Image (cartoon, grey):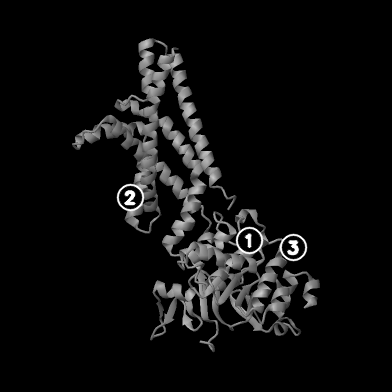
Amino acid sequence: MSWKLFWLLVEASRLTIILSAVSISLGFVLASLVCAAVMSGNRAARAAGRLFVSFFRGTPLLVQLLLIYYLLPQIGLNVPSEVAAIVGMSLCTAAYQAEILRGGFVSVPRGLIEAANMCGFSPAATFRRIRLPIAVQLTIPALTSEAIMMLKSSSLVSVVGVIELTRMAQDLAASTYRPLELYAAAGFVYLVINIVVAGLGLGLEKRMSWGRL
Amino acid sequence: MTEKPAIKVEKLVKRFGANTVLSGIDLVVPRGQVTCLIGPSGSGKSTLLRCIAFLEEANEGLIEINGEPLGFTSGEYGERNRLPAAQIQKVRSHIGMVFQQFNLWPHMTALGNVAEALVTVRGMPRKAAEERAMAQLSNVGLSARAGHYPSELSGGQQQRVAIARALALDPDIMLFDEPTSSLDPELTGEVLNVMRELAQSGMTMLVVTHEIGFAASVGSKIVFLDHGEKIVEGRPDEVFGKPRHERIDQFLDTYLDRGAATLL
């Protein structure tokens, strides 16, 4: 395989990285809201949060992407397919990230919150200074895995016409008749990206580690 | 305020579902003294302490801290009226609490744990808070460990940091919930020593403990609970001296080796 072909794959991986990074970040913001809703005292908010999670976790991302791609023009939004892809990926990862965050919050030992309570912390201060930092530290490994999952799942957005890494490999395979080499090369590029992501996650985990609870 | 007891508990009832844990406890904790709550596991002593800290809400009865009602007041017809949250927080600010599991915040250093509430709750500048925290840490003999995280400290050191954290907020009543129960025997002494010094400084203390020796030597008053009821209360020599209440005898026999029981 020529370097020229390989370079085309690397170029296409830029879109994979951008789509994933944007979706994971937007998904995190949305997940925080969904997690807050699911854990809130408000019944309507709790129900809405649970419905969101069960829908986006319970249906395939592929189906969600197709739905969004065909739904947006129906409601009068003509957006580029990249935007449809980001919307779909963000919604899907938000459901998973919300559950990961919730798991982190319920794992914060009750005694730590009682200690804050005895020191006169308001609920908001307890959240900001005690619950949030501990929950984030507890969930970094799971969030890193989720980021890696999303990077790989981004290959699905080719169905809505986004030319990312997998789609580029497909197209090149079709025109050069060398599928084996191209898919192997695409897999290699995914692997390199994900090793970097895993390394970043591990670094973050180390930086925030203050030992066991 | 001086003639009012530090803590006054009246007819306190606490139920968890169908299970009555405290069945009408009356208790007076005098100012400037050490009161020790002892009794078998499940006797309700920790629950009583947690009700006084307002970490649990009692189902019936009233609690006064320095003469001020905590949580509820008695209405015209004997009904209980809940006080506003700000009032509850104000009364609770007189109380410092030390837990069996230390409950230090794992993401903050020893210094950070002690300084945190001074900054977050009292609004002190970080630098001033840390200076005050450092003074508190050196009072419990831990200034050399200020930069260590809880996971890097022994159980005894963690509990001393927890005591410093509570004291930094300048409470006038300190509650201890089995402060040495999760410590190895050789680490128990250092925590009891800190508590002994605190008692000598005139702090009002209410201590739930299994350390009968500590209760007998430092306590001015011993309260023995069993099955959610107050069985005996009095000076250590009255409670532990002979003739002894039958239930105390049983308790000492079951919970201590006999040698220790005869030493008292």
| Mark 3 closeness class: few <14, some 14–19, many ≥20 residues within 10 Å | few
Which residue carries the number 2 mark? A48
Amino acid carrying label 1: it is Gln
The residue shown at (38%, 10%) is: A176
Q: Nearer the viewer, mark 3 or mark 1?
A: 1
Q: Secondary structure at mark 3?
A: helix
Which residue carries the number 3 mark? B186
Which residue is outermost to the top? A177
Do pointers 3 and 1 mark residues of a single chain?
yes
The residue shown at (34%, 51%) is: A47
Q: Is residue B38 visible?
A: no
Q: Secondary structure at mark 1?
A: helix
Return the chain for callout 1: B
Amino acid carrying label 3: it is Glu
In this view of the protein, which residue sits in the foreground, B152 or A96? B152
Quadrant of res B246: bottom right
Residue B181 image position (x, y, % from top left): 66, 65
Spatial CA distance of label 3 from label 1 is 14 Å
Give me the disc on residue B73: none
Q: Can you say which quadrant of the picture contains the N terminus of chain A? A: top left
Spatial CA distance of label 1 from label 2 is 42 Å
In this view of the protein, which residue sits in the foreground, B74 or B98? B98
Residue B71 image position (x, y, % from top left): 45, 75
Q: Is residue A106 visible?
A: yes
